Image (cartoon, rainbow, N blue to C red):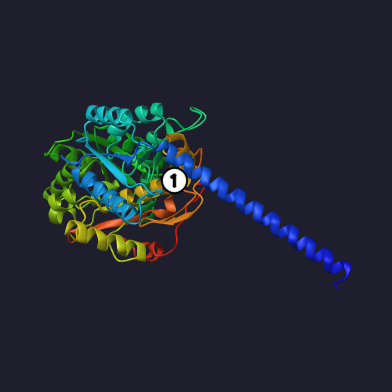
Amino acid sequence: MPNSFDEETELDACQRTIANSNRAKKLCITSALSLCVFLSTAVHAQTIRIGLSGPFTGGSSPMGESMRNGVRLAADEINSSGGINGLPIELIERDDTANNEIGAKIADELTRAKVVATIGIVNTGVGLASIDYYQKAKIPLVVAVSTGPALTRKFSPPSQPVNFIFRVSPTLDLEAKVLAADLKRKGLMRVALMADTTPYGDSGVSSFAEQARIAGLDVVIECRFKVGDTDMSSLIKRARSAGATALVVWGIGPELASIARGVQSSGWRVPLLGSWTLSMRNFIDAAGPAGDGALMPQTFIQDAGSTTKNSFLLAYHRAYKTDLIPSPMSAAQGYDGMHLLAHAIRQSKSLEGDAIRNALENLNFRYQGVVTSYEKPFSSRDHDAITTNMIVMGKVLNGRVDYAYAEDQQRSAILRVKRHSN
């Protein structure tokens, strides 16, 4: 016969077992209800429709095509493993040709088609013309390439209660900060600044001028050029006459290549630095030897690295039959952005935009991407995933981009997570 202490112990154990059983039942019911909510929102859907918008033709197409390829790779991986909560991703792809008006029409079309979210946007002007549609429709947009700061800040609280625009690319502010620090480290204090006349160029001029002021650099001259310009000789002459010891450029591949060739033909031996777009294939190919030595900020350099990075590069090679990605950063950011968006939809167990937005702001896992390791990449007040510790300096050399500095290559192997105060 057990004593009273043993009887109480057995009784307590029995009660605990019943309580645990009840909690387990409640957990199962809660999970079942969450799944029912997801299924109810998808009752008429056989796929999860996600918009994909970018320039797949024209001068910006190396960025757009590379981004699209990265997004497609991620979507294929997700679908091959069962999709999102049992539903496959269907990409609704649209070519904005880097045209602001076309980009706005595409944003209107995709929101009316009730995609659950969109990923893309390469050109800042297109982004500025598009974001109002997504914000009004309460449909998340994940910006994969554009670096214009205003895109994620326009609707940021307190200006709006909630913000539906997110980004996995660096901002121009971060690029400019890294460039200014590099120039100061080299002692190149007198800078000529050249930028195109697009909103991207406007943002570049504004961001770099501010970071140059903070770093104590002297912008001795500012020159602007139009998209499509090929003769940059007069601008180069003015920059040289101003006594610049470095040339900083902001634009896209074809025009930047014209500047590099013009500098070489003028006999001016000046360091060339600029926005991340100096890594584009259409700059490297068009500039030829004149582009060697060009320096730019990068989130991703196409070389062997982590297991995730190596798997991504192998998958890209197998799918697209090339070892040279036209815009490696665009491809990597598109890939990571698609996976982050899929995780948010899976976590929200919903196809409603507000639920997906909330999940993006409160991701409850660490995702090891090809650019970096994403741990709490977004919050309600911060929709930019990239911080300065994730950026390295790249250098064009012999037809490809490599690390400019050995310490950057070594640092790239270190786990880099978001700094929540920059």
**For residue 58, which quarter of the picture?**
top left
Residue 4 vs 112, above or below: the answer is below
Residue 4 vs 107, above or below: the answer is below
Q: In the rendering, at what x and y percent does residue 30 appear?
A: 56, 45
| Point 34% across, 65% down: residue | 305
Tag 1 secondary structure: helix
Q: In the rendering, at what x and y percent does residue 337 appear?
A: 36, 47
Residues 90 and 240: in front is 90
Would residue 260 be found to the left or right of residue 43 on screen?
Answer: left
Q: In the rendering, at what x and y percent does residue 343 appear?
A: 42, 49
Q: In this view of the protein, can residue 397 be seen by the observer?
A: no
**Circle 1: residue type:** Ala
**Residue at the limit of the structure toward the right, as seen here:** 4
**For residue 82, which quarter of the picture?**
bottom left
Q: In this view of the protein, can residue 52 be seen by the observer?
A: yes
| Point 18% across, 51% down: residue | 281
Q: Which residue is mark 1?
A: 344
